[in-house]
Amino acid sequence: MQQADIIQAAAQIFRQKGYHGTSMQDIADAVQLQKASLYYHISGKQEILVSILDHALDLMIADLEGVIAADTSPAEQLHQAMSTYVGRLAADADLAAVLLLEHRSLDAEARSSHIRRRDRFESLWRGIIQRGIEQGDFRPQDPRLSTFALLGVLNWTITWFRPEGDFTPDQIANLYTDLFLHGLLANQMEEAS
């Protein structure tokens, strides 16, 4: 049994039952281990939760760093970042749901470490927006508030997206990008005058 198998199974159960509604026996059953044998691999639910959150953020940070490393405009980076992120949320829905919904279940020490890692992730998004403002591609807006708004829209996708639904992750990302970069106004130039 690999720890990665335990993490993946636990993420699925945490997504279904919530962190507090999940027992160590639930996790042991999912990976077909005796509960005592599960403790050979991990110390408890808190360790599993930390591992899930760390793994999910590491994947998302690596995705975003790859987008930022490309020599493209801030608008294109934002589009690629949104597309990559929505794709990750759809592909790794269990990890994403636990990351976005269960971080409140961390104990104080683990929460502090998690917040530093989450802040790193958010700073990468803010950097794209800040560069867009500095280069004149984006209107001057508060990059921090803009990042919160953007991530709020993207993150909420986990609550309603279904693989068999009407939209693919790419279609969703394209719509979100258009909304975020152009808004809902049909004639922006006429409205501005």
Image (cartoon, rainbow, N blue to C red):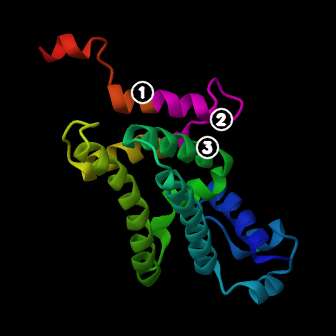
The quarter of the image holding the N terminus is bottom right
Q: What stretch is highlighted in magenta?
A: 156-176
Reply above or below: 184 against 88.
above
| Residue 125 in the figure: left or right of residue 30 | left
Local crowd at mark 3 within 10 Å, few (<14), some, or many (≥20)? some
Q: Look at the numbered disc 2 and give the secondary structure of its residue.
A: loop
Residue 158: within the magenta?
yes
Local crowd at mark 2 within 10 Å, few (<14), some, or many (≥20)? some
Dot 2 corresponds to which residue? 162
The quarter of the image holding the C terminus is top left
Q: Look at the numbered disc 3 and give the secondary structure of its residue.
A: helix
Q: Give the label on residue 47, or none.
A: none
| Residue 180 in the figure: left or right of residue 143 | right
Residue drawn at 67 percent across, 87 percent down:
43
Determine the CA span between mark 1 and mark 3.
17 Å
Dot 3 corresponds to which residue? 87
Q: Look at the numbered disc 1 and give the secondary structure of its residue.
A: helix
Determine the CA span between mark 3 and mark 2.
12 Å
For the residue marked with disc 1, what is the amino acid? Asp
Along the polypeptide, which appears first: circle 2 or circle 1?
2
For the residue marked with disc 3, what is the amino acid? Gly
Q: From the viewer's perspective, is the residue at label 2 or at label 1 nearer?
A: 1
Reply above or below: 12 against 49.
above
Q: Which of 119 and 79 is in front in this view?
A: 79
